[in-house]
Image: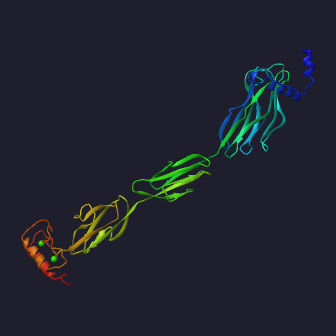
């Protein structure tokens, strides 16, 4: 033993490493499972701008008294903030030294170099523990950085490297952006109105569905096809996309035949689909309302309604009071009709033969026809 010590003591660290390497090679498969140096967790995924910690875990298969590591990372994705000692070497309460003998953190090169730790006593530790904890912050670029361990060394109490295996890890940085869906008018979208987070680069299919009585009127915002109710948007930044819906409108055209007025007035009027429009007809003096033509609720009522489920024309027909048969000509036919109802009575103008609207069919009605005799006939 003394002889061996005498031989080993002058050996440099390099020589010791070479010796250990030779031993590893020579013992080969018969060696016990080597001490492991791993990154924990082996893989992490974080959002851009977040901070995470990575542990360098050593699981000794024999008593160890010191360790060191270097590590490389992708500085375009993550930045090292600090390297702190873990509980590996102090697990039995012994004092330790931990620090860097190299450059330490280099966020330009993407390296952490020269970190070493030793127990400041003759003790060793043999239970797994965290040798070092590294804090990284993520940049704002998506990607995966390998955490590559190199220049790792784990030594026993004699300052001799123990067989070990080091395993790399990785960190994936995910950049997300917010897609805010919005609606103008009455309808819904998929995704629903509101904010939604997506990974950068995601192509999101969006669709718009109008409520009843409304129609899709286009997208505003950065979409592939603003005129299509189903299209896509690519998540390359925070963005807002608005689906516009417009009420479906129909035109009600009011018209008159004869002499009178309507409400709404004669001409076109636009209404939202489904609107129930009250319409009324008022004859001019000497005229009477005969009825509506067109799609109305009650064709015989001067005031009725029409429902705007499509474009439509409604005509109020008026005729002269003394044109009893409503043919536009005042002649014998009108007289005959009065004669056929002669002497009848009822509420004023309950029948056309009550020309003067006094509730009885008599000579007064005949006189009115006579006063307008021939009007509108054959001219
Ligand atoms: Ca007539
Ligand atoms: Ca009368």
**x and y, in percent, of residue 203 in the image:** 57, 50
233 above or below 249? above
In the figure, residue 369 lies in which quadrant?
Answer: bottom left
Query: In the visual, does 300 lie left or right of 108?
Result: left
Q: What count of labels does the image hold?
A: 0
| Quarter of the image where the N terminus is located | top right
| Quarter of the image where the C terminus is located | bottom left
Which residue sits furthest top? 1
**x and y, in percent, of residue 86 in the image:** 75, 28
Query: Which one is in front, 91 or 41?
Result: 41
Which residue sits furthest bottom? 379
Identified at 14% across, 81% down, the residue is 371
Query: Which one is in front, 117 or 36?
Result: 36
Is any part of residue 87 visible from this angle? no
**x and y, in percent, of residue 191 in the image:** 51, 48
In the figure, residue 68 lies in which quadrant?
Answer: top right
254 above or below 70? below
Is any part of residue 310 visible from this angle? yes
Query: In the visual, does 255 lie left or right of 44?
Result: left
Query: Which one is in front, 27 or 221?
Result: 27
197 above or below 299? above
Q: How is the image coloured?
A: rainbow
Q: Quadrant of ligand 2?
A: bottom left
**x and y, in percent, of residue 268 in the image:** 36, 69
Identified at 24% across, 61% down, the residue is 298
């Amino acid at each position: 033993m003394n002889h061996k010590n005498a031989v080993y003591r002058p050996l440099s660290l390099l020589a010791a490493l070479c010796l250990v390497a030779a031993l590893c090679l020579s013992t080969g498969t018969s060696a016990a499972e080597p001490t492991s140096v791993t990154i924990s967790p082996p893989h992490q995924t974080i959002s851009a701008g977040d901070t995470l910690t990575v542990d360098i875990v050593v699981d000794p298969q024999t008593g160890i008294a010191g360790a060191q590591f270097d590590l490389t990372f992708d500085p375009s994705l993550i930045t090292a903030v600090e390297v702190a000692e873990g509980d590996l070497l102090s697990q039995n309460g012994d004092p330790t030294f931990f620090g860097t003998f190299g450059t330490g953190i280099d966020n330009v090169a993407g390296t952490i170099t020269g970190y070493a730790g030793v127990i400041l006593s003759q003790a060793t530790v043999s239970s797994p523990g965290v040798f070092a904890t590294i804090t990284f912050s993520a940049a704002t670029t998506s990607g995966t950085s390998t955490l590559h361990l190199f220049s790792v060394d784990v030594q026993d109490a004699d300052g001799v490297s123990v067989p070990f295996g080091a395993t790399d890890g990785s960190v994936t940085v995910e950049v997300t952006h917010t897609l805010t869906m919005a609606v103008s008018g009455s309808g819904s979208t998929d995704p629903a109105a509101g904010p939604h987070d997506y990974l950068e680069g995601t192509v999101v299919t969006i669709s718009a569905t109008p409520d009843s009585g409304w129609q899709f009127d286009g997208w505003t915002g950065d979409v592939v096809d603003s005129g299509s109710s189903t299209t896509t948007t690519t998540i390359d930044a925070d963005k807002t996309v608005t689906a516009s819906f417009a009420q479906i409108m129909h035109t009600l055209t009011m018209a008159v035949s004869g002499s009178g007025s309507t409400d709404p007035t004669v001409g076109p009027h636009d209404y939202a689909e489904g609107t129930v429009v009250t319409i009324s007809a008022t004859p001019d003096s000497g005229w009477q309302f005969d009825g509506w033509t067109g799609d109305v609720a009650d064709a015989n009522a001067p005031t009725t309604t029409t429902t705007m489920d499509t474009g439509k024309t409604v005509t109020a027909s008026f005729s002269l009071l003394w044109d009893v048969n409503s043919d536009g000509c005042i002649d014998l036919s009108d007289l005959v009709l009065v004669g056929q109802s002669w002497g009848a009575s009822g509420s004023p103008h309950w029948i056309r033969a009550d020309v003067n609207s006094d509730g009885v069919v008599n000579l007064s009605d005949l006189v009115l026809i006579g006063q307008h005799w021939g009007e509108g006939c054959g001219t």
